[in-house]
Amino acid sequence: MSIKFGSSVSLNEFANMIATVGSDVTVIGQGEPGIGKSSMLKVLAKRFPDYELAYIDCTLLDLGDFALPYTEVVNMNTVNVNGKPELMGGLKVTKFAPNARFKFQSGKPVIVMLDEIGKAMKAVKNVLLTLMLEKRIGDMHLPDGSIVFGTTNLSTDGVGDSLEAHARNRVCFVTVRKPHAGFTADGIDPDSWGAWALDNDIAPEIIAWVKQFPHALESYTDHAQKDNPYIFNPTRAGQTAFVTPRSLEKASHIAKKRSALGESVTISALSGTIGESASRDMQAFFTVVDKLPTWEAICDSPTSAKVPDDAVAKCILVFSAISRVDKDTLPKWLKYADRLDKELQALFARSIVKSSNKQAMAVSNKDFVKWATDNQWLF
């Protein structure tokens, strides 16, 4: 095993790092725009269901957003000539009440996410240093076990992110790499965008498009991608929209509403979300989808529902099934899938057993177990 010092981590590795050492070390993840860094709070919320959540958009913070002063009267002790303590009059002192957004008041451990910390004003960054190092603002400490982590963009992204050396020395700074498409001959890599998309109701035509154009999720940091028309590239003047995991999720919402939007408006909306090159290429996938049998038709008549001739169409059907199938419809889908090419059956089976949402349902289903037993050579 060889270790590459300074190499990047995946989103899952970033989440595991925060969950494992985050109560002792503040981890700051830097990465390209739209790759899923901001989703870490949702991921960690599932792993720590008893924790309070505090999302902090550092770009919006000013000094007055941390704490407000108030006065409190305290008694003063002095020593008299007999060496005995003597209570004197009260003295007014100033204290600071922390903003409720940081959840100091919760009484439970808190997960604080400092989003876009590299874009915060310098004075704001200075105040956040004690929160990152000591989990403290003013005199108030977060409850024991609390986690503080942050996100920022790469300095090469050209969007104004920076963190001074003295600040970096207080945290663990890691580079989070852009998730890859994840479609392989053996199914779908569980640590990929494809696996996430199948578990998060992304439109099947969007997933199929990424499978067809996996370079849409490559990184501009790879010099070989300098002419890639789909991706973000800070050296490309006038670029207003591009493909990222975040923009693909938005494209999914648009794709699901395209019957109401109409073809022209749909393409315009997609162009403003994932860029013109990607939206034009995606248009052909919509034409294919419109010719597919409905999910209802497949479940009602699995042995006679139409099987499309087009390979892309079949692929879209499989991704749709992975997203929609449940314990009641799985046996019906398997009957229909038996009429598909074996490699597509394998894509379905391998993907479903790796799905965090569908695995338990599939492996406990007698029809799926029988199919898997009869087709062991596909695994």
Image: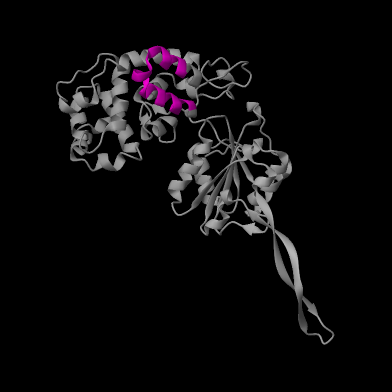
Question: What percent of the width, then of the height, locates residue 190?
Answer: 40, 35
Name the outermost residue toward the bottom.
82
Left/right of residue 234 with respect to residue 322 in the rendered view: right
Left/right of residue 9 with respect to residue 122 in the rendered view: left
> Of residues 338 and 5, which is closer to you in this image?
338
> Of residues 267 and 14, which is closer to you in this image?
267
The answer to whether residue 164 is seen in the rendering is no
Taking the spot 32% from the left edge, 27% from the top edge, the residue there is 319
> Of residues 101 and 321, which is closer to you in this image?
101
Question: What percent of the width, then of the height, locates residue 37?
Answer: 53, 36
Inspect the magenta stretch and tell me whether residue 259 lies in it: yes
Question: What percent of the width, then of the height, locates residue 308?
Answer: 24, 16
- Classify the position of the C terminus by image quarter: top left
Q: Picture quarter containing residue 342?
A: top left
Identify the colour scheme used.
one colour
Q: Main secondary structure of the magenta part?
A: helix
Inspect the magenta stretch and tell me whether residue 89 lies in it: no
Taking the spot 34% from the left edge, 37% from the top edge, the residue there is 354
Name the outermost residue toward the right.
81
The answer to whether residue 179 is seen in the rendering is yes
Question: What percent of the width, then of the height, locates residue 12?
Answer: 48, 40
Give the number of marks: 0
Relative to 244, residue 171 above or below: below
Magenta part of the protein: which range? 247-270
